Image (cartoon, helix red, strand yellow):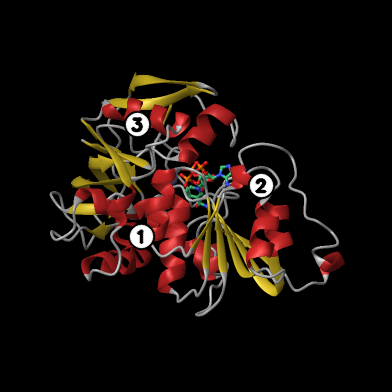
């Protein structure tokens, strides 16, 4: 089968591989729609998770099942499914301890596609533990909406969970690419009062307002901490969600969050050895400014709840889709768009 792969750090290309086989609990899926991600860009071009050779890229897909293993109970060939980017090993002690995305084989091991095994930018891909990791795609949902679920929706929403956004609270979402825009939508749903969104591109700003941002902060027009503090009369915000930004973004978050507030990080820091935290603004470690950071949770239960938001009209993630490309080969252009981020790109989708 054909797949679009990371050949080595900094280099991509089309390769031929054997079609994957399903173990007893697994499924083989043919993609219907896929989406390239900023994380693919970090992986290939920054070498953020280290060297990988001839590894098929991609972790965002919806597809049609072509094969299931002998022990799979709830899915069959022909079913259309949403495939979460994170497909944990549900038979692990870490799952029992509540951290499915990080299991015994090491950090971030719940993230298997295009990290520990071939990803979804191929004619077929393998899904471990199908009953626990797949969710049926309702007919009422468009492919464009569905393919925003595996990563953009779940990660953005996880940002609001990590920051523990409370109703009526003042929130700042730093970064309004597709992930940050879903964090804006999630904060609105959790009842945020004032909602700052930090970005610069007009297209993302317009969508941020549609998802509920009340104030826009342009990081190209001055220090974002100063802008947020000025707008809040020096008080700062209750919650910060980091979904983009430069190498000083964690410091900025600590500087703008109130004592007692919380920071949720979903950004993938692709470069550097350490991230500075401002000691004094963090109260020498005693300011009750919580920092939580995480990989988006995966699995079937979470996907089914997020599907419910779309089916019942509470969320329309298709506003993120800025480009539609046809055929598997379109993924090459899609990844280039994610890498170069021209002004009109939010998220490209490839309809296979
Ligand atoms: P984008 O690159 O599309 O968006 C980044 C955003 O950050 C844009 O709004 C951009 O503004 C803004 N930005 C850039 N520089 C600065 C700066 N110096 N200060 C403030 N804002 C800035 O990324 P995505 O939305 O696709 O992804 C966001 C992050 O989430 C990525 O690091 C990605 O790898 C990560 N990720 C993490 C996952 C997880 O599970 N934790 C899963 C998926 C993604 P503008 O372009 O308007 O100038
Ligand atoms: Zn992604």
Q: Which quarter of the rendering shows the C terminus?
A: top left
Q: Residues within 10 Å of mark 1 (few under 14, many from 20)?
A: some
Among the 4 quarters of the image, the one containing residue 15:
top left
Residue 169 versus residue 349: which sits nearer the camera?
169
Q: Residues within 10 Å of mark 3 (few under 14, many from 20)?
A: many
Picture residue at 58% right of the left edge, 30% below the top: 47
**Residue at mark 3:** 334
Q: Is residue 171 above or below residue 155?
A: below
Q: Does residue 258 appear left or right of residue 270 in this picture?
A: right
Picture residue at 46% right of the left edge, 47% below the top: 177
Task: Tell me the distance, in whole angstroms, between the alpha carbons under discs 2 and 3.
Answer: 31 Å
**Residue at mark 2:** 222
Picture residue at 23% right of the left edge, 53% below the top: 81
Mark drawn on residue 210: 1
Q: Earlier in the sequence, mark 2 or mark 3?
A: 2
Task: Tell me the distance, in whole angstroms, between the alpha carbons under discs 3 and 1.
Answer: 24 Å
Task: Tell me the distance, in whole angstroms, between the alpha carbons under discs 2 and 1.
Answer: 24 Å
Among the 4 quarters of the image, the one containing residue 269:
top right
Picture residue at 46% right of the left edge, 42% below the top: 201
Q: Is residue 74 above or below residue 331?
A: below
Q: Earlier in the sequence, mark 2 or mark 1?
A: 1
Q: Earlier in the sequence, mark 3 or mark 1?
A: 1
Q: Is residue 257 above or below residue 208?
A: below
Secondary structure of residue under mark 1: helix
Residue 173 in percent (x, y) is at: 54, 59
For the residue with label 2, is its CB less than 8 Å from the closest atom of ligand 1?
no
Residue 328 in percent (x, y) is at: 25, 30
Residue 116 versus residue 234: which sits nearer the camera?
234
Q: Which quarter of the rendering shows the N terminus?
A: top left
Residue 242 in percent (x, y) is at: 58, 55
Q: Does residue 31 appear left or right of residue 43 in this picture?
A: left
CB of mark 2 within 8 Å of CB of mark 3? Answer: no
């Amino acid at each position: 089968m054909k797949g679009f792969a990371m050949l080595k750090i900094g280099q991509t290309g089309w390769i031929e591989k054997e079609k994957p086989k399903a173990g007893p609990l697994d499924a083989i899926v043919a993609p219907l729609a896929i989406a390239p991600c900023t994380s693919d860009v970090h992986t290939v071009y920054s070498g953020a998770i280290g060297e990988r050779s001839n590894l098929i890229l991609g972790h965002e897909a919806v597809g049609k099942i072509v094969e299931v293993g002998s022990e799979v109970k709830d899915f069959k060939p022909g079913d259309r499914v949403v495939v979460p980017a994170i497909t944990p090993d549900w038979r692990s002690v870490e799952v029992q301890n509540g951290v499915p995305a990080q299991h015994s084989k090491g950090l971030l091991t719940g993230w298997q596609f295009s990290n520990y095994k071939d990803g979804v930018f191929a004619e077929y891909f393998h899904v471990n533990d199908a009953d626990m990791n797949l969710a049926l795609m309702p007919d009422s949902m468009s492919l464009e909406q569905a393919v925003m679920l595996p990563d953009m929706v779940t990660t953005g929403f996880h940002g609001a969970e990590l920051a523990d956004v409370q109703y009526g609270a003042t929130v700042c979402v730093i970064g309004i690419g597709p992930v940050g825009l879903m964090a804006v939508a999630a904060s609105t749903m959790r009842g945020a009062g004032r909602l700052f969104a930090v970005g610069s591109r007009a297209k993302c700003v317009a969508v941020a307002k549609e998802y509920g941002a009340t104030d826009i902060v342009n990081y190209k027009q001055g220090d974002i901490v100063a802008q947020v503090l000025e707008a809040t009369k020096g008080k700062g915000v209750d919650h910060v969600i980091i979904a983009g930004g430069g190498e000083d973004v964690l410091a900025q978050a600590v500087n703008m969050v109130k004592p007692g507030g919380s920071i949720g990080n979903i950004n993938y820091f692709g470069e550097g050895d350490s991230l500075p935290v401002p000691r004094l603004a963090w109260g020498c470690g005693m300011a009750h400014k919580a920092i939580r950071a995480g990989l988006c949770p995966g699995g079937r239960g979470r996907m089914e709840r997020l599907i419910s938001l779309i089916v019942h009209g509470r969320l329309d993630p298709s506003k993120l889709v800025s480009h539609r490309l046809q055929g598997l080969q379109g993924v090459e252009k899609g990844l280039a768009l994610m890498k170069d981020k021209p002004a009109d790109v939010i998220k490209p989708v490839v309809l296979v």
